[in-house]
Amino acid sequence: MIASDISPLASRLSSGAHTRAVTDPFHGDLLEVSMGPHHPSTHGVFRMQVTLDGETIVKLKPVFGYLHRNHEKLGESTSYLGSMPYTDRLDYLNSMTNNWAYALAVEQLAGQPVPERAEYLRVILAELTRLLNHTCLAGFLLQDCGCSGTPLMYAFREREKILDLFEALSGSRMMCNFQRFGGCRTDASPEWLAAAKQLTDGYGAFLDEYERLITGNEILMARTQGVGALKPDLAISAGITGPMLRATGVDYDLRKVDGYGFYPRFEFRVPLGDHGDTYDRYMIRVLEMRESIKIIQQAFATLPAGPVMDPKAKLRGFRPKPGEAYGRIEGPRGEIGFYLVSDGTPNPYRYRVRPPSFVNLTLLEDLCLGHTVADAVIILGSIDIVLGEVDR
Amino acid sequence: MLGSGLLSGLAVTAKNLVGSFHDPARLTTVEYPEQQAKLPEAYRNFPFLVSENATDPMGTLRCVACQICEKECPPQCIYIEKSKDKKPDATGKLQLYPAIFDIDTSVCMSCQICVEVCPFEAIKMDQVFAIATTDRFDALLLKREQLAKPNAYYHTIHPTEAAEVDARLATERKAAAEKAAAAAAAKAAAPKPPAPPPAA
Amino acid sequence: MEPLEQLHARLLSAFPGAEISIVNNPGPAAQHSLLLPAALAREIAFFLRDDPALRLDYCSNVTGIDWLKAGHIEVVYHLYSMALKHGPVIIRLRTANRTDAVTLPSLTPVWRACEFQEREVFDLYGVVFDGHPDLRRILMWDEFKDHPMRKDYIEPDDYEWEPTPHGAIHDKAKAHYPAAVTPAEGAAKP
């Protein structure tokens, strides 16, 4: 807020922060800063109500719900199929994995089998989504560190190639709406598979370039190492999942634990961190991308022929028997689950989304306490939230 | 050595900067309005109604106003009113047709579910994306006259899919025609009701 | 992991006299659940978390379900074990009714993962969690009155006017803004 040539009010408005002094008998004058909801560092409309002692955070309350459209109520008022395009809009970077998680829950609810080729396609698409998401995160995290431009643009350049693949297959870059109950909507053509294979084979070179650009960078290390360190037992208790959990050293990856899809057929490692700090969270994602490339290459090598849709699957008039099911998969941000209760009608009686980034936000305050405002920005960036999913 | 990470990063950016002048693969953008990236065949935007020919689009709509898409549409952007009378479709069978068929493109989310649930191959996805208007209301509420596009247009935007659809429809129509012919033949060959006994 | 019947028997012996019952799931998923008495729920939850054979240290999902006909609200917890990598064990709590007796014990002291999700259930279903450290609305704004995920929630009728052909929506908006709608409607329709 060093803007002597504009009025104080204007400078306050332009910085997006509303400030007022808080008197506290133990800390002297504290400052309460409202970061957001319209702030470039919050990855959407998200507000952090921060209480500062000088530059140090002594209290932080996340405030969200600005994007709330009651997705779950919408799911209860539309048919099972009608919710599928809405799941694209939860975590709008990873629509393929959201589709899969929802399809998996409905398939469990209805006892619907899935053909082998469709499962392979799902694995390929989910791992491409993981590449896409982690690439974006690596770019955005650097943006949050203040490195505006270069790494994000490099990341987006590669992301665009994956989005082109998604568009060629499903018709839309981000709102794919591709999985169906009992398979996938369309089959991948040989040309598409060749293009996807070429991209996957070249992705390792991009990762090498990106790591040369940033991983060994001394400024990045100084900014992120030891910042926002998380202990494993607290992470487990708080239900943290995904790369953020594995950065603390807890070996819990649903691809290994549940073995859904055909993941047990593929050979891959689960990278684990040691310190649980922001740098580990970044490195885990880079390492996971390298494992994803391995999975996709194995899937291409063994992709079976056959239909991608179960012939008995029903598109219209789909009514599962009364019952309930909780289906979950390892999304790029963590465990994404759908809990469905059916009462035998075409609409679910209860449709619940377990969003990973919503639960991962639980520990935002614990991670940020004692750090500075600038660190809060990168800690939030390393948690990797998407507000479409947090607010639903 | 402290600073070596910084220097290697700078080397990467330098390589990309210089490379973008020499290597077309490193130039990943196009100058949009003048140059346009080619849309993939599967690209979808908003639905349109398929008519058999361009000369009489309203008379040859494949839609029979069954209202399945209206019911299944997740954001409820389709509105259909059935006709009072019936018209023959491509197989010659008398069918209803939509007297009103509206799609509110300000509500439509391009999910393609209407296309998937349609049993008559009557609604397909268009590829026109530059649809900005100055009127937020009526200009985005498309009537059936604006929605109807000939089958030839469908062939230009989704050639593979359209060929499959045409082949499927052709077999269905052939089967229907054969069935009708068989029914007619059976009717002709059926023994006539016993003629009244000749008057003695 | 041990079968649910065995776990049920073990819980009954650890908590004699507690009304713990198995809720059968008739669907193909066959994920059966345990219905716990609200008064003992937190003790049982600590038992489930700390029992060496179970070690359900990870509460994945907290869901509210409004059973309008039965007249209660149910809160469902999906528990897994990260240490032993098994699960799920599904536990359910029920409120006495849907109006004035909607208090349940909070399980946030057992699993921190419940903190935001119980706040969400409070916000959208109106279940009051006793012992929750910070029970405020989370998705709706603080001044909001009702609980929108309840089955008998009446949605607001203050739609912005737009030329939708769906009559029901239009009529509701008309009732809400009788004066504001008419001129716009007149202007929009030739």
Image: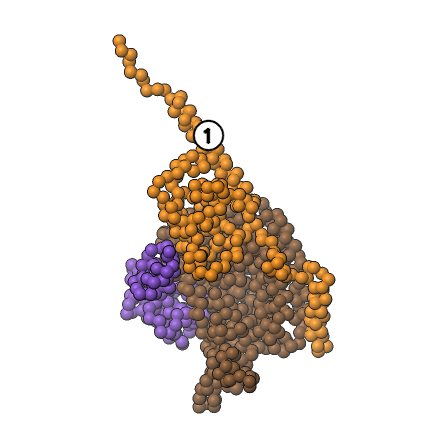
Chain colours: A brown, B orange, C purple
Residue found 45% across the figure and 33% down from its top: B176
Return the chain for callout 1. Answer: B
Is C148 placed left or right of A367 in the picture?
A: left
Q: Nearer the viewer, residue A283 or B197?
A: B197
Find disc 1 in the rendering and name its residue: B178
Label tally: 1
**Extreme residue toward the top, this view:** B200
In this rendering, position of residue C95 left or right of residue A138: left
In the picture, the quarter occupied by the C terminus of chain C is bottom left
Front residue of B57 and B91: B57
The residue nearer to you, when weighing A352 against B68, is B68
Q: Which residue is at the front of the view, A93 or B132?
A: B132
A332 w.r.t. A109: above or below: below
Question: Is residue C101 something that shows in the picture?
Answer: yes
Name the spot of residue A37 as percent of width and height, x first.
47, 74
Q: Measured along the vertical axis of the image, is residue C128 above or below residue A315?
A: below
Q: Residue at x 67, y 58 (%)?
A: A202
Where B193 falls versus C19 (above or below)?
above
Residue A20 at what x, y percent from top left?
46, 84
| Amino acid type at mark 1 | Glu
- Which residue lies at the image location 29% right of the left edge and 12% below the top edge? B198
**Crowding at mark 1 (Cα within 10 Å: few <14, some 14-19, many 20+):** few
Q: Residue A358: give x, y in percent of width and height.
A: 47, 68
The part of the image, by quadrant, that contains residue B25 is bottom right
User: Going 66% across and 76% down the picture, which residue do you hit?
Assistant: A218
State the residue lying farthest toward the front: C190
User: Which secondary structure, mark 1?
Assistant: helix
Q: Percent x, y for residue A217?
A: 66, 74
Determine if residue C37 is in view.
no
